[in-house]
């Protein structure tokens, strides 16, 4: 029905779908309504800088009725944005804010997409692979904390 | 609207309308607050004492644990996980070790599984005791704090004898355990079980039928089962709203299927039900410990894992029932000694989202009760 846009795989006993980006809001809607995956456990992202489509966005879903957990993965390029899953599962509100905060992936239609763990006004997206482990936004630190550097 | 600081005394005959004329008041419950269980900032919009809405500002305890994970090997990262939910450190370690064991396709030997279950359930009781003490203290009942912390000491003594640390225990290793159960471990655990049973009755005697407790907690912070599922809230909060779901029963891990225990649920989804659910959970944990300590088998405590761990390429998501809810680990391995990405799904982070919904229309004092009943630990919320 979805042609080549969707791929169902299993690894170590855990099932997951690799879905094309264009199918995203539809697949999640079908999973929630028809297949009864009513609990969105987690939403996260992984950064592969050497790939053309650099980010992997992963939804982990669980169905109480079926007692089954699946993952839905999609790949997007840097700068692309995904439609927000907040209309489907209210829990995605803070989860999407954290993905935006750490990776810079924007979600269209999110009610209030702003940073959640880092201070507002921080520049940079820490969980990307090109952000160093000791790196900090020294401009923010100097303005707000009044010290030379956080190191 | 003129700036009040620039008004001169002659202007005060005809003052302009200022923000003091509106009914709505925005108050900051700042990061330093004795009842927010850590550095949590809540911005409340109030109409008198009634809460119209609130917004949580978090991130004061963000330490970048997920970024650190990408720069440490799997065994080196093990102590970091205890520091997230520092109240119940043993279960964090269990979730992480089990997730990596799944990636490596090894299983801890039976003796290790039994001791893991005993330590994890002891840790659940300790976490619920701390929750009860601090929650009651926020609401105004000071005595349970002293009782629960005094009794919690016995559990911490067992942890200290076992692995040397009371709070951030690092009790488990990938593949099993490092330390053999010390001489007298089983006797200590049995003594503890018979010691704490009357103590739990004591806590119930102080609070369960106490009129002030009932007035402060019944009908406060109600959340329906449907809202809990939509918001992803798990743990005792979900169970008190009527959804009978416990990962130890639904997707058992670490030989929980060998033990018999009940999963309590509540009906109303208010603070009182969450209190009752956690009290019953403490007793059920004792039941599990009694069954486990009878049948610890002999055998090795560590499976065959290589010294230098290089899990094959792949991803895994594994979650356990931590005292606070569903604690999940999503680990991506690229075949090297360091994980490519570790994502921790913290129960307190997701549960805290529900605070806004639970506090609408309640009084300011109820916000304190609801924050306490959600049982959040900021170390986990912020990681």
Image (tube, rainbow, N blue to C red):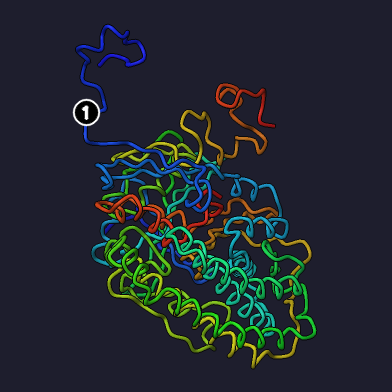
Residue hosting label 1:
B21
**Of residues B323 and B8, which is closer to you in this image?**
B8
- Of residues A130 and A146, the one nearer the viewer is A146
The spot of residue B190 in percent (x, y) is: 66, 88
Instruction: Look at the picture and state if A85 lies above or below A147.
Output: below
Vertical position of residue B323 compared to residue A117: above or below:
below
Is disc 1 placed on a helix, strand or loop?
A: helix
Taking the image as shown, residue A1 lies to the left or right of residue B217, namely left
Q: Is residue B310 above or below residue B286?
A: above
- Protein chain holding label 1: B
Residue at 35% across / 10% down in the picture? Answer: B6
Q: Residue at x 49, y 34 (%)?
A: A119
Q: Residues within 10 Å of mark 1 (few under 14, many from 20)?
A: few
Residue that appears at 75% across and 70% down: B163
Instruction: Give above or below for B50 relative to B249.
Output: above
Q: For the N terminus of chain B, which image quadrant? A: top left
Asked whether A51 or B28 is in front, the reply is: B28
Picture coordinates of residue B302, whole percent (x, y): 74, 77
Q: Is residue A31 visible?
A: no
Residue B358 position in % (x across, y down): 31, 56
Q: Position of residue A45 (x, y in %)?
A: 48, 48
Left/right of residue A95 with respect to residue B192 in the rendered view:
left
How many discs appear? 1
Q: Quadrant of residue B162?
A: bottom right
Q: Is residue B154 left or right of residue A4?
A: right
- Whether residue A55 appears in this view of the structure is yes
């Amino acid at each position: 029905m979805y042609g080549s846009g969707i791929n169902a795989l299993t690894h170590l006993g855990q099932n997951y779908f690799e879905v094309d980006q264009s199918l995203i809001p539809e697949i999640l809607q079908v999973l929630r309504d028809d297949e009864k995956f009513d609990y969105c456990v987690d939403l996260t992202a992984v950064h592969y800088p050497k790939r053309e489509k650099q980010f992997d966005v992963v939804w982990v879903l669980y169905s109480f009725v079926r007692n089954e957990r699946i993952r839905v993965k999609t790949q997007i390029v840097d700068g692309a944005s995904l439609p927000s899953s907040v209309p489907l599962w209210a829990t995605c509100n803070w989860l999407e804010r954290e993905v935006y905060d750490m990776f810079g992936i924007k979600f269209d239609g999110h009610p209030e997409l702003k940073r959640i763990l880092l201070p507002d006004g921080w520049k940079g997206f820490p969980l990307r692979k090109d952000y160093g482990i000791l790196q900090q936004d020294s401009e923010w630190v100097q303005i707000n904390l009044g010290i030379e550097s956080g190191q | 609207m003129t700036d009040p600081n620039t008004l001169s005394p002659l202007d005060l005959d005809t003052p302009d309308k200022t923000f003091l004329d509106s009914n709505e008041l925005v108050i900051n419950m700042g990061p330093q607050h004795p009842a927010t269980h850590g550095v949590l900032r809540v911005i409340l919009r109030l109409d008198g004492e009634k809460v119209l809405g609130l917004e949580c500002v978090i991130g004061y305890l963000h330490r970048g644990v997920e970024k650190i994970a990408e720069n440490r090997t799997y065994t080196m990262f093990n102590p970091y996980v205890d520091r997230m939910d520092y109240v119940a450190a043993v279960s964090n370690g269990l979730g992480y070790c089990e997730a990596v064991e799944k990636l490596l396709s090894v299983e801890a030997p039976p003796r290790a599984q039994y001791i893991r279950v005993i330590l994890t359930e002891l840790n659940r009781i300790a976490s619920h005791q701390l929750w009860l003490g601090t929650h009651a203290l926020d609401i105004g009942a000071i005595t349970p704090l002293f009782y629960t912390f005094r009794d919690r000491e016995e559990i911490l003594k067992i942890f200290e004898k076992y692995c040397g640390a009371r709070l951030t225990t690092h009790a488990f290793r990938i593949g099993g355990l490092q330390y053999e159960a010390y001489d007298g471990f089983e006797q200590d655990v049995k003594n503890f079980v018979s010691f704490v049973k009357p103590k739990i009755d004591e806590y119930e005697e102080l609070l369960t039928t106490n009129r002030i407790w009932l007035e402060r907690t019944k009908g406060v912070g109600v959340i329906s089962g449907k809202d809990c599922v939509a918001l992803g809230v798990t743990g005792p909060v979900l169970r008190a709203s009527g959804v009978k779901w416990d990962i130890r029963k639904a997707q058992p891990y670490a030989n929980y299927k060998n033990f018999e225990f009940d999963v309590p649920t509540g009906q109303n989804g208010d603070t009182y039900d969450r209190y009752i659910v956690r009290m019953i959970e403490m007793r059920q944990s004792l039941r599990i410990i009694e069954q486990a300590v009878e049948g610890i088998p002999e055998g090795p405590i560590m499976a065959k894992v290589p010294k230098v761990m290089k899990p094959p390429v792949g991803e895994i998501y594994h979650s356990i029932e931590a005292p606070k809810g569903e604690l999940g680990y999503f680990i991506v391995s690229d075949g090297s000694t360091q994980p490519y990405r570790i994502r921790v799904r913290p129960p307190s982070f997701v549960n805290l989202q529900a605070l806004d919904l639970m506090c609408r229309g309640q009084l300011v004092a109820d916000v304190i009760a609801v924050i306490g009943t959600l049982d959040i630990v900021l170390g986990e919320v912020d990681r």
